Image (cartoon, coloured by chain):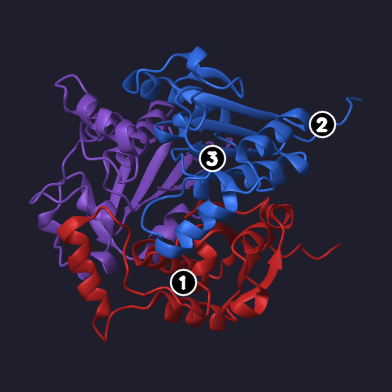
Chain colours: A red, B purple, C blue
Amino acid sequence: MSAPAAPPTEQMAVVLTESAADKLLPFATLVSGAIALGIRVDVFASYWGLLAFRKSPATSPSEVSPGHGEDGARLEQVLKAPKAPSWRGILQMAKSIGELHIYACSQSMELLGLKKEDLDPLVEGVTGVATFIDRTRYANVSYFV
Amino acid sequence: MSAPAAPPTEQMAVVLTESAADKLLPFATLVSGAIALGIRVDVFASYWGLLAFRKSPATSPSEVSPGHGEDGARLEQVLKAPKAPSWRGILQMAKSIGELHIYACSQSMELLGLKKEDLDPLVEGVTGVATFIDRTRYANVSYFV
Amino acid sequence: MSAPAAPPTEQMAVVLTESAADKLLPFATLVSGAIALGIRVDVFASYWGLLAFRKSPATSPSEVSPGHGEDGARLEQVLKAPKAPSWRGILQMAKSIGELHIYACSQSMELLGLKKEDLDPLVEGVTGVATFIDRTRYANVSYFV
């Protein structure tokens, strides 16, 4: 009699293409919620999503997407406060307690003139899109941010 | 002999972070299409997605995202016509015929200084991200708008 | 004794609502990666996603979303180079080797005043949202771009 198979790990796949705080915060929050539930998260950072992890010049952690008028200006002020949530801090915490894997898209690294050493260590490697899709083809949920 | 189990309800999960008409209309249309097929829809409204449901000041139902030039201006004109589709009307209709559940993200409610009573009754409650992910971890399809 | 059933084709569902290069490139790259792995891809082009396929006036293949400052200007320059990747070329290649199906959203066709013949032949038909959701309700992964 064979032992019952371990249940497959649940997985969330995220393609990240944005660098503004109003996208990175809901993204980081989703990631941390999944990690808290024991769900593995694989992130494919491409285009502006790479800039979020660029060491220098770093993008501003409080800048929001254009087109949000007064509400946008108010959110930027709130995010500048010392106690404001930090998407980077949320991701670091998530990585320390669970399976969070962030890969940089090789095609957009080249277009943006970036090298692996230009990126925050939260990014664990550079990979092609087919590798990412193969790793996440059976993910439970998938989001394009 | 036990009766066959009822098939599990199909489910669509949506994280909504936008408030412009050119995002809310395809979002509402997706929701209504799913509801018409008997699929349950769970929505997590966060950041600008919350503003879509703010009672006052309400966002303009015809304003589109910046950066679309003449096409954007033309769509805004079309959406101001009396017979133009209304994302809010589409969601209300969907909720009246099926299982549409819209939750507000507790973290962004706090950052934006919003209370439950500031939001349209289409929003049925305020919840944390982990609760939303737990409710939608087996969703058939998932979209981040 | 019946023959074993063929494994169901894996499927990726994409709702495309953007027309800027910094969204169309990661979109086309995802599509081509899926096709390379033998995954069928169904795309629902709506709102600005339709403009990406409009023949005339065609959108610029190098224009990026607003709000990206110097990085945006630099990416536009890179995308104007003769050897730059072309999202349209990537999609054409993907369609020639695998199952890529792109449908135009009937509701937004009407709002934008477009007819089937105004669109690139990459778009194989005009369809309603319920048909799209029905076709993709068991997709392995789903993305809203």
Look at the numbered disc 2 and give the secondary structure of its residue: loop
Q: Let me know if marks 2 and 1 both belong to one chain.
A: no
Q: Residues within 10 Å of mark 3 (few under 14, many from 20)?
A: many
Circle 2 or circle 1, nearest the eye = 1
* Mark seen at residue C61: 3
Q: Estimate the x, y position of residue C108 in percent, counting from the top left.
A: 37, 25
Which three-letter amino acid code belongs to the residue tagged 1? Ser
The residue carrying mark 2 is C6
Circles 2 and 1: CB atoms closer than 8 Å: no
Look at the numbered disc 3 and give the secondary structure of its residue: loop
Residue B82 image-quadrant placement? top left
Query: Taking B122 as reference, is C40 above or below it?
Result: above
Q: Chain of mark 2?
A: C
Q: Nearer the viewer, residue A41 or C55?
A: C55
Q: Residues within 10 Å of mark 1 (few under 14, many from 20)?
A: many
Q: Residue at x 69, y 31 (%)?
A: C92
Task: Return the disc, 2 or 3, that comes first in the chain's sequence.
Answer: 2
Query: Taking B8 as reference, is B138 above or below it?
Result: below
Q: Estimate the x, y position of residue C62 in percent, counting from the top left.
A: 52, 45
Q: Residue at x 63, y 47 (%)?
A: C30
